[in-house]
Image: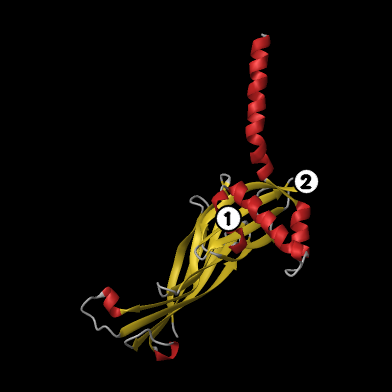
Amino acid sequence: MRKLVFILSILIAINCFILFPKCYNSLIDKNVVDNYLSSSEDDPKNEVLRKQIIKNVLNATGYNNWNEYIDYIDLKIYKLDVLPNDKQDILFSLNLSKDNALIAIYEDSMNDKYFYKTKITNLSPVKNISLFKNFLVVEQLLDERLGAFFIDNFVEVFYFDNNSFKNTFKKSIYYDEIYKDIWLDKNAPNDIWNKNIQKTSIDYLDEDIPKILAITTNIQSKAKSVSTPKKEDFKEISKTSQQELYTWDENEKIFKLTEKKQLNE
């Protein structure tokens, strides 16, 4: 019996030793966050606190391999009630690179610390985070103008379901691309360029059944140039607008396109 108790004690000790770092990494002191938010960017302690927060978030989310790039990671902090609890939630968005970002969601543990709960990954650099009813609206920017000739400023709407955030809607609010005809057709002239711009205004309708109204204008232009054309070289050839209504489907947990119509210019 004593031998069994001894073995169980050893196993418990080992589990505590293994779990302690994980629990420790899942906590952020509220004072650290508050001091960071209240300090100015030119305050020497601001950078120390920023790195401390980023390092904690990277460790909690399993992104430890990004620790060596802390100096270049952009941090944004939002206090929003996004989890189905009675506590205050705090969100940390980390823009890791020009095309990679994550959001870590922590909740108030009521003991001077925030406790890590979950994350949203596979994001483009985050510009802003807001709430629409029980939905999290994440505005992102993918800038590929160097090499790929396009920029995409878009929003994704997430819904918390089954202990994780699910993507329920995605729409570009500004998309701009440039390409040559010959890239699509090898027999096309080598000096014809196309420019497509898509601008969308989005309204989140606070109704009994949530809806999203999107009005999109598409502008197509062309230019003739041996090298990459300047903005003023493009001449508009067409402009169209359409309206789309997306309605929340409670069964599938997504916003479905329910109405679509062309608009007169």
Q: Residue at x 59, y 63 (%)?
A: 72
Q: Position of residue 103 (x, y in %)?
A: 59, 56
Q: Considering only vertical position in the picture, is 237 above or below 108?
A: below
Q: Position of residue 116 (x, y in %)?
A: 65, 47
Q: How is the image coloured?
A: secondary structure
Q: Earlier in the sequence, mark 1 or mark 2?
A: 1
Check disc 2 and report the residue beneath it: 110
Q: Residue at x 65, y 21 (%)?
A: 10
Q: Mark 1: which secondary structure?
A: helix
Q: Position of residue 23 (x, y in %)?
A: 67, 40
Q: Residue at x 26, y 83 (%)?
A: 190
Q: Residue type at mark 2: give it.
A: Met
Left or right? Give the position of 164 relative to 87.
left
Left or right? Give the position of 254 relative to 196.
right
3D distance between C-alphas at marks 1 and 2: 32 Å
Q: Position of residue 96 (x, y in %)?
A: 55, 60
Q: Choose top left, top right, bottom left or bottom right for residue 186.
A: bottom left
Left or right? Give the position of 67 relative to 232.
right
Q: Residue type at mark 1: give it.
A: Glu
Check disc 1 and report the residue beneath it: 68
